[in-house]
Image: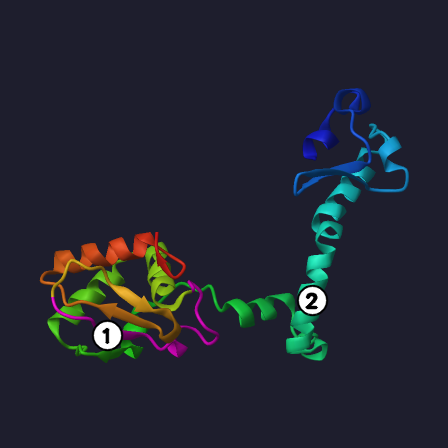
Amino acid sequence: MQYLLDYEGNVEETFGQYFEVTEHRYGVTEHLELMPNGSNTPVTNENRVKYVELYVDYLLNKSVQKQFSSFQSGLLHVCGKKILEIFTAEELELCVCGEADTIDTITLEKGSIYKGFHPDQPYMKQFWNIVHNLSSEQKKKLLLFTTGTDRLPIGGIKTLQFIIQRNGSDTEQLPTAMTCFHVLLLPEYSSHEKLKSKLLVALENCKGFGLR
């Protein structure tokens, strides 16, 4: 679109474009007019701005109007229009998606719950030493792996109930998680190096609710 707007030559002769869009649906090609008599109205240097405006409006609004109307109807049915009106777009995003702040693993460690482990045992010290030294992106992946999202809940890291549960002794299996309950299932590996290696493999290869 920007190329069309910036083009210095004869737009009509070069592009041969009319005020219509072509859609391919289930093997059928449709030509949809962007305005009355659009299939007979060529795009020229003089009207190309109008063409781009109509084309963008079609892509972002009209082409998905049916789907968006269904989504809107369902959202308003669940939430109610009056409730949504009190939020700005940013506030609503925060309610739905959570916070995108940097993950403070020191605070996360202090609030964690342990099952089968003790926070003062050397193995847990090794675990948190690895976690604290992860990159920001890797810390997000740890959150995603354990909770199903890389965004923090409203209220920040202090409101997150992070559970570390012992999942057997030394093994070749990777750590796993129960995302609905924010539980990291962690085997007690035989060495610091193995713990780090297995954890990083799990974090780097997880996607959604399983491993890639």
Q: Residue at x 26, y 63 (%)?
A: 132
Q: Give the range drawn in magenta.
A: 149-169
- Judge whether 178 appears above or below 202 on screen: below
- The earlier-in-sequence mark between 2 and 1 is 2
- Judge whether 182 appears above or below 145 on screen: below
Q: Circle 1 sits in a helix, a strand or a loop, which is it?
A: strand
Q: Is residue 17 shown left or right of residue 41?
A: left
Nearest the eye: 26 or 10: 26
Looking at the picture, the colour scheme in use is: rainbow
Q: Mark 2 points at which residue?
A: 72
Q: Is the magenta stretch mostly helix, strand or loop?
A: loop
Among the 4 quarters of the image, the one containing residue 191: bottom left
Which residue ends up furthest to the front in the rendered image?
A: 27
Could you tell me which quadrant the N terminus lies in?
top right
Q: Which residue is drawn at 44% across and 65% down?
A: 151
Q: Which amino acid does label 1 sit on?
A: Gln
Q: Which mark is residue 165?
A: 1
Q: Circle 2 sits in a helix, a strand or a loop, which is it?
A: helix
Q: Please state the total of marks drawn on the protein image.
A: 2
Nearest the eye: 42 or 30: 30
Among the 4 quarters of the image, the one containing residue 109: bottom left
- Judge whether 39 appears above or below 175 on screen: above
> Marks 2 and 1, Cα distance to the nearest angstrom?
41 Å
Q: Residue at x 20, y 64 (%)?
A: 129
Query: Residue 157 magenta-drawn?
Result: yes
